[in-house]
Image (spheres, helix red, strand yellow):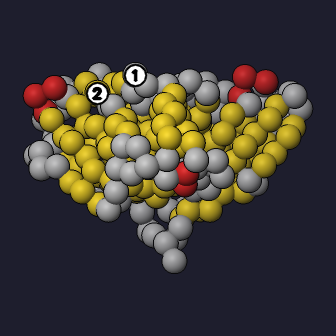
Amino acid sequence: EAQVTQNPRYLITVTGKKLTVTCSQNMNHEYMSWYRQDPGLGLRQIYYSMNVEVTDKGDVPEGYKVSRKEKRNFPLILESPSPNQTSLYFCASSSSNEQFFGPGTRLTVL
Amino acid sequence: AQKVTQAQTEISVVEKEDVTLDCVYETRDTTYYLFWYKQPPSGELVFLIRRNSFDEQNEISGRYSWNFQKSTSSFNFTITASQVVDSAVYFCALSDLPSTGANNLFFGTGTRLTVIP
């Protein structure tokens, strides 16, 4: 079954404690991206990757890092989380014909 | 720059009524894709439709229909005979297509639809 998986699905953490949200896809897609969803703002792209070792900033990259060492994985790293990064995060994987979203990770930073 | 506007923040209808969700977009690209996604209370994003900029034919899928008009830069979504299960947040999105053809989506702010039994 074609899918994008994210872990964890829910996370409560404290300011400054580094965390990683994993994302994995099984469709051999080259293109992956991360979005955050906030009330009244819709979804905004954080980072994207067009292939292994190729990443670039989206619209709201501040405070985030990503890496793409393997085609299937695209982790999102928050080196020093802050309360304004409390949000719902979606990983996405796409080809030219289709786009799949992961189930979402709800992050709360206290 | 790409932009998607969903002016309706919240809509409430009584079950079995028809409802139209508006979407207006801006882009300088001549080739682009438009999407609608549904986000039910459980939170996942459910793909509903993708339409490319060269295909202005309206589309119908069961109780759902979409009206794409390039002249007004709109891609409106109508639910006929609404049901309680249609209650969700609906997002319209525009795809930026770089040369690789991959999708970089620009989302509207969403419309929350509540269908009252």
Seen at 72% across and 36% down, the residue is A78
The relative height of residue A87 versus residue B16 in the rendered view (above or below) is above
**Residue on which disc 2 sits:** B24
Residue A76 in the figure: left or right of residue A71: right
**Which mark is first along the chain, 1 or 2?**
1
**Badge number at residue B7:** 1
Task: Kindly indicate the quadrant of the structure image that contains residue B74.
Answer: top left
- The chain letter for the residue carrying disc 2 is B
Image x and y of residue A76, in percent? 65, 44
Q: Mark 2: which amino acid?
A: Val
Q: Residues within 10 Å of mark 1 (few under 14, many from 20)?
A: some
Seen at 66% across and 39% down, the residue is A88
The relative height of residue A81 versus residue B15 in the rendered view (above or below) is above
| Secondary structure beneath label 2 | strand
**Badge number at residue B47:** none
Alpha carbons under labels 2 and 1: distance apart: 8 Å
Q: Are marks 2 and 1 in contact (CB under 8 Å)?
A: yes
Image x and y of residue A91, in percent? 56, 50
Q: Mark 1: which amino acid?
A: Ala
